[in-house]
Amino acid sequence: METKLFDQDHIAEAAAVLAKGGLVAFPTETVYGLGASALLPDAVAQVYQVKGRPSDNPLIVHVAAAEQVAAFVDNLSPMAKQLMDTFWPGPLTLIFKIKPDSLPSIVTGGLTTAAFRMPDHPQTLALISQAQQPLVGPSANTSGKPSPTSAAHVWHDLHGKIAGILDGGATRIGVESTVLDLSDPSGTPIILRPGAIAKEQLETVLETEVLLDKHLVSAGEVPKAPGMKYKHYAPNTKVMMVHDTDWPAAINWAQANHFKVGVLAGPTIAEAVRKETAAIYQYFDDSPEAAARGLFAGLRALDESTAALDLLLAATFTEAGIGAAYMNRLKKAANHEYFQENK
Ligand code: TXA
Ligand code: MG
């Protein structure tokens, strides 16, 4: 199959492909999604197939307006309405109990709940509106690989397998949306996946406590979001995390072992280690926002570096705000391994 690149002047054409059951990847403010009509089970089956995604891992239903959710959910709670008012369009996915049989079971992985999100990207909001149906949109990468933050990343993983890619440039946030479970209307909301909307922001708006899914805090727990249990975000090259103060020791250790090292870090660390490393992917500045925006692109770039690297060393951040989302993805990519002195 030839994969077409659509630009913003060809959104109607891309929407027509989706309405007929084709697959078109789309930009969002977080990462690129692999779009298909959420109402066409055969199209959704294709999404699992081209990604190589386990079928028990449910998809997010992307809508162009909060009102679209009413077709699938009875009696949205005041909490849900407040969050949608405050954060939609934006990087917050909400999980609700759905009306029986209102969505194909292939979308929900057979669960009685489903995930909904209104992405903050004008081209994709237009795409969903013109397709006249909600779209599923898992990250548009091969399952297990870093999520795509540009049309080129999508092309790399999926060209020849999908009908098209709507190119909306590089994504602004760079890590996937916060997933918040509101499926127990009388219970406490639970964050299943950290993202750009932080726990503290949710608590401020809701004026109530928000929990973090247990497995996000302690190892060995079975996660509530099925997708969180899989190995994820991993390039082929081994990744290790480095605490700020450990960089000189980490570089010495790598040199002593004759490892060809690639580094992902902000300008301050990058400058300090530049001479001793084979390749660097430098975040735009030293902030956790810049790190989140650059993480997946950096993992991909260094993984494919012509320097054929043995090891990627990545900067760490305090686990607050967007730093928590960055560290959640980086830990998975690094298989939770930190550089430790006297290794
Ligand atoms: O930012 C994002 O959310 C991106 C963009 C494209 O919108 N999409 C994305 O989709 O990251 P995906 O499929 O890669 O991740 C969806 C996550 C998975 O971990 C999945 O298990 C979880 O949401 N999920 C979906 N439906 C669920 C449900 N009913 N209950 C619990 N977890 C659910
Ligand atoms: Mg994904």
Image: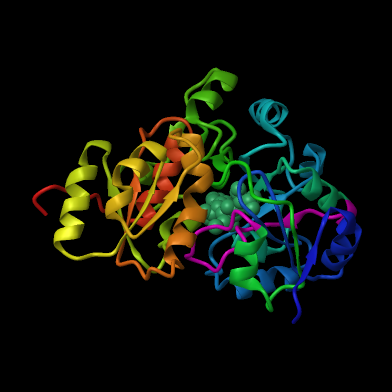
Q: Quadrant of ligand 2?
A: bottom right
Above or below, 242 against 57 in this view is above
Q: Which quadrant is the N terminus positioned in?
A: bottom right
Q: Which quadrant is the C terminus positioned in?
A: bottom left
- Closer to us: 41 or 335: 335
Residue 129 x/y as whole percent: 87, 49
Above or below, 1 against 124 in this view is below
Residue 54 is left or right of residue 221, and the answer is right
Residue occupying the far front of the picture: 275
What's the magenta region? 130-150
Number of numbered markers: 0
Residue 236 is left or right of residue 21, and the answer is left
Residue 97 x/y as whole percent: 64, 45
At a point 53% along the width and 65% down the height, the residue shown is: 56
Q: Is residue 102 visible?
A: no
Residue 251 is left or right of residue 321, and the answer is left
Residue 283 x/y as whole percent: 47, 43
Please tell me whether residue 142 belongs to the stretch shown in magenta. Answer: yes
- Closer to us: 48 or 252: 252
Q: Quadrant of residue 306?
A: bottom left
- Closer to us: 75 or 142: 142
Residue occupying the far left of the picture: 342
At a point 72% along the width and 42% down the height, the residue shown is: 118
Please tell me whether residue 240 belongs to the stretch shown in magenta. Answer: no
Q: Is residue 218 visible?
A: yes
Residue 307 x/y as whole percent: 38, 68
At a point 47% along the width and 24% down the height, the residue shown is: 209
Residue 267 is left or right of residue 34, and the answer is left
Q: Quadrant of residue 246?
A: top left
- Majority secondary structure of the magenta segment? loop
